[in-house]
């Protein structure tokens, strides 16, 4: 336990998340005792520059070497700027930047030194959240589900439903709020659904020199190539029983499937692939969800949201409809998880990552 954190009571924690979409750093305040959420505080978004995104993109899928060192410098500098200036913070949750993820092979790599941030910010920092889960046989991802369970209690949900996070990779959390704690069998099921914004962003960058398909404008003028979509859905990953997880580049061949299509048709097809993979994923839920609440950048894409609405047999809504912040939910999650780590509580369980037993991952670094 961190010497700065009391054993009980509410903690004001600051969480940080830099996702695989490589857009920037989200930081947000959450107040929690590690079980229930008391409230949320200020947040901030620090975008990566085009040059910084290029450095990070060159390091994707790389485990060591100069590319990783350069990416580490970018990540640490951006987080230091983003995390500075918040008041009353007792603890920081620092996820770092995932560069490579192969839990059954090399492991999982998130760059950024939480110890260096602790020294610079003069606050305890919890980081390296995924390694212990992987060591115990887990996928190391997704890690937000325990926070999603707390959010379900916070919004006073009564029926099973899903959180769908559409970042670079899509992941879904099935939550049954009728349970008392996230560790209980049946309370949660979580897994990566498939690629989400990453291939669309990569296509936009390669063809048009822009970071994303803003507001789905390009996809909206295109036609989905059904042959490419069918080939994509034939991938064995989609029939694999969860929990399961993906690296950002696991479906890099998606780009090859749309190489000969126009910009609009290629973008529309990649967007349809994301929606179809989510529909496949929902089939794994223990029972049909009452609603799918969408968080992450993908919810800003009206074409993707419409495709999801058509594909799923339940309402599809942005998390803002229940009073949550879809831009900051993952950052808030790592603030929440930091408090759980500091208090010796679990951060993942067999139904969220496939880990052999409930585990509380994370390293706590104290400033000297």
Image: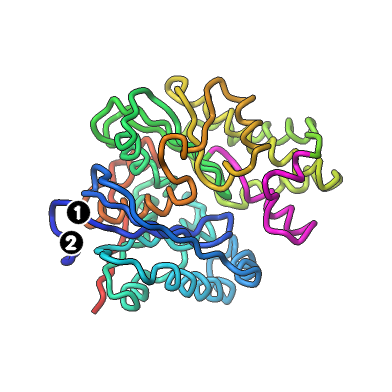
Q: Which residue is mark 2?
A: 5
- The boundaries of the magenta stretch are 193-220
Magenta span: predominant SS is: helix
Horizontal side of residue 220 vs 67, given as left or right: right
Q: Residue 242 location, x and y as percent?
A: 47, 34
Q: Is residue 197 magenta?
A: yes
Figure check: 294 above or below 42: above
Horizontal side of residue 31 vs 145, given as left or right: left
Please indicate, yes or no, whether residue 137 appears anywhere in the rendered image.
yes
Q: Are marks 1 and 2 in contact (CB under 8 Å)?
A: yes
Horizontal side of residue 123 vs 197, given as left or right: left
Residue 310: mark in rendering: none
Quadrant occupied by the C terminus: bottom left
| Residue nearest the observer in this picture, 6 or 305 | 305
Task: Give the color scheme: rainbow, by chain, secondary structure or one colour.
Answer: rainbow
Specify the farthest residue to the left: 7
Residue 343: mark in rendering: 1
User: Few, some or many C-alpha atoms within 10 Å of disc 1 (few <14, some 14-19, many ≥20)?
Assistant: some
Cα separation between marks 1 and 2: 8 Å
């Amino acid at each position: 336990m961190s010497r700065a954190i009391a054993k009980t009571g509410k903690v004001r924690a600051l969480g940080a998340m830099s996702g695989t979409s490589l857009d920037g750093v989200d930081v947000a305040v959450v107040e929690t005792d590690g079980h229930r959420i008391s409230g949320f505080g200020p947040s901030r978004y620090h975008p990566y520059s085009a040059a910084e995104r290029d450095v990070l993109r060159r390091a994707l899928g790389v485990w060591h070497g100069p590319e990783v060192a350069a990416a580490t410098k970018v990540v640490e500098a951006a987080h230091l700027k983003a995390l500075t200036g918040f008041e009353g913070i007792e603890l920081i949750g620092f996820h770092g930047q995932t560069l490579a993820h192969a839990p059954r092979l090399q492991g999982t790599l998130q760059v950024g030194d939480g110890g260096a941030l602790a020294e610079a910010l003069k606050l305890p920092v919890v980081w390296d959240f995924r390694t212990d889960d992987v060591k115990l046989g887990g996928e190391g991802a997704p890690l937000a589900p325990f926070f999603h369970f707390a959010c379900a209690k916070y919004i006073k949900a009564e029926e099973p439903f899903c959180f769908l996070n559409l970042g670079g990779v899509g992941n879904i959390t099935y939550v049954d709020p009728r349970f008392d704690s996230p560790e209980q069998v049946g309370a949660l099921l979580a897994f990566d659904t498939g690629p989400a914004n990453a291939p669309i962003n990569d296509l936009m960058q390669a063809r048009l020199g822009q970071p994303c398909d803003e507001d789905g404008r390009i996809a909206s003028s295109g036609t989905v190539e059904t042959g490419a979509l069918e080939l994509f859905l034939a991938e064995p990953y989609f029939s694999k029983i969860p929990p399961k997880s993906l690296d950002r580049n696991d479906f890099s061949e998606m780009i090859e499937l749309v190489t000969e299509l126009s910009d609009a048709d290629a973008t529309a097809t990649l967007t349809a692939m994301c929606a179809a993979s989510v529909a496949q994923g929902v089939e794994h839920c223990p029972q049909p969800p009452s609603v799918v609440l969408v968080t992450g950048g993908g919810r800003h894409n009206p074409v993707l949201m419409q495709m999801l609405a058509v594909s799923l047999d339940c309402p599809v809504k942005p998390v803002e409809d229940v009073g949550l912040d879809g831009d900051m939910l993952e950052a808030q999650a790592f603030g929440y998880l930091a408090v759980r780590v500091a208090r010796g509580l679990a951060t993942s369980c067999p139904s969220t990552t496939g880990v052999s037993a409930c585990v509380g991952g994370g390293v706590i670094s104290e400033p000297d």
